[in-house]
Image: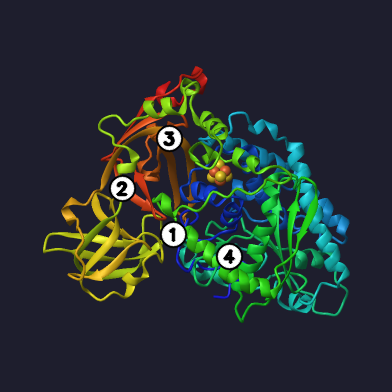
Amino acid sequence: MPFMPVGMPPLGGPVGRSRMRLSASGLVSWERCSRQWFHRTKQGLSGPINPEMILGIIVEDALVSLLMEDPGDRALDAKPCWIEWQDDYSKPNDGGGEEPESLQDIEQYLLARIPACAAKVIELGAKKWKEAPFRSPERDWSEKSQDYVEALLLAGIELQLEEVEKCHAAGGGPHLSKWRENGDPHFVRAPRWCEEPRFPIPEKVPGNSLKLAAIKISEETQSKDESEITWFEAWKIARPWVKDPRVWQPQRLYHPDGWAAGELDMLLRWQGKATVVDIKSGDGSSGWSTGLASQLQFYQWLYLRTRTEESLISEVEGIEGWYLGSKDRHEIDIWSAEELIQKDEELHSIWQAMTNADGDKETWPEANPSAWKGESVEETCKRCHARFICDFVSEELSQEGLIAILPPRMKELSRQQVQEKLQAREPASPISVIPNRVNVEGRISGKWGPMSNHFGEPVHGAVLSTGAKSSVVVEEMAPGTFLELKDLADGNWLIKNAAPGVWRNSSRIYLDSRSSLVKSGEEDVEVTRIGLLPTRANVDGLVVSRRTAKGIRIDGKPWTMMTCHLWDGNHTIEVVVFGWGVTETFADITVGDRVLLTGAELGWRAGLPQLRISPRNSRIEVRSRDWQPMDELPDSIQ
Ligand code: SF4
């Protein structure tokens, strides 16, 4: 289907973002420091959250929700649709407004909605901040005021009204007559509250089936004459495609070969060519803005690589960052046709380097920090959560990073003393000895796929058996990581460098680019018997990162995933628990806790080992924790 700003995932990825595809944020992080990308994105070792991270996401939702309004649709003092939708999304439009006749009417309608939307941003942000398990200790959500958010939303509205003015002055652009005939001519229309949301995979929307995929011809009367464009028409035509907050399925563009993906914030299309816009809640003065050019150029490249013959728009004429904090458009130079061709290869090789990095340090990308905007390279490292384990930085910076993650009871200790204290205690072993790769041999048959794995990603699989009673499931570690399996002839095979793991109490073998297949008997290597595959581990470490991720699957079912990273003084490993296995003990774990984990199931994520908590077989125990004032204590230990 020729979706325009969104597409079907060719290789899956509905649970969270795939760590196996190149994304704009991954590219920016890679360019800032490839090693930092590895720790942050591939290992998932993220630092504490700050209020700006939360604000950026919610302000974007609030702003696009205002752009989805149809001025005059309701009374001036009616609730903004975004708020009404959150309260009760089945509520019909109550009408009562008047169609705007001027730009001022449109502006007045939108401005009247800003205070309520800003109040909602503050309310939602406060909740998210409170629920975040790892927050910057010196920061607080109360730093953000409603007045500040109102100013951000006003800036966004004014930037869009500039587009409306330009569109009006240009007589509506090249698609005016199409608009007048049938409404929005784009296959994926710019979302509006007065129209049903459109889902990229409508057949997975419970109770809706294909209904939502059908293009709804706007019910409003379209003027078909040659009359001058009205301001209301200019508002509708200039309205950008935005990520519809009602759509829980990924609204991403997927490279046809599956190795890159990206989610645009906004796409202006009224001029007949596309302008990609990224919404920023800051003012563009911080070092983070250094990555804007790479981010937007990546989107330009991805947008163009996902066009089809049916696409109404096949050119990108602009890429812009809208900085709401300073009401600025930062226009970035687009890549030329020659540069775009070069980038195909360059981006692909970056993706390959990303894919090849795994648990073996030899494969890690180099530590190559680039200078922070107007500051030194050191500033990049100072802001890096992984500096406590990075061998590139100075002793001083590494120690500073260590102190930042240590609990108060350990802050006075030297690195060596910390390492001694963190030595694994019975029955745990050091993280470095967690079983890694194995060779297995047997008959491969019963291939299937692609079918959803436990992350909801479609992978190929088969059964490897060594006799009537001994068999194990063999599966791609992630979509497309071992496509050889798909067309493999049934027969006896030796699988080298397979990753052993367990899922729902049964052993499982995962395959990725490090794995290989040879015919049985062709090589003489040590083989692990299926019954002896390592599947569990006991670890003892300090919690150095903590995250909770929530979302909605493509079929509308909610999911939750909690993770923490344990550090044993030398190595780190990610521990994950899925919604149905979350216990109060895990939910209460915070950075600085010393945790003993026994019976954790060995799993794999993007080529790296990951320990999974099984509600039945794993046990997690907080060995030491700093005492805090009573009102700060998690419920479970109050
Ligand atoms: S500390 Fe500096 S060099 Fe090391 S990973 Fe972080 S940014 Fe890169």
Name the mark nearer the viewer: 3 or 2: 2
**Whole-percent x and y of residue 465?**
17, 64
- The image shows residue 74, relative to residue 297, as above or below, that is above
Query: Mark 3 and mark 2: span between their CA atoms?
Result: 20 Å
Query: Mark 1 and mark 3: span between their CA atoms?
Result: 33 Å
Element marked by disc 3: helix
The kind of residue on which mark 4 rests is Arg
The kind of residue on which mark 3 rests is Ala
Whether the residue carrying mark 1 lies under 8 Å from ligand 1 is answered with no
Element marked by disc 2: strand
Q: Earlier in the sequence, mark 3 or mark 4?
A: 4
| Residue behind mark 3 | 587
Q: Is residue 57 left or right of residue 517?
A: right
Name the mark nearer the viewer: 2 or 4: 2
Query: Mark 2 and mark 4: span between their CA atoms?
Result: 39 Å
Element marked by disc 1: helix
The kind of residue on which mark 1 rests is Asn
| Residue behind mark 4 | 198
Split into quadrants, the picture shows ligand 1 in the one at top right
The image quarter in which residue 90 lies: bottom right
- The 10 Å Cα crowd at callout 2, few under 14, some 14 to 19, many 20 or more, is many
The image quarter in which residue 597 lies: top left
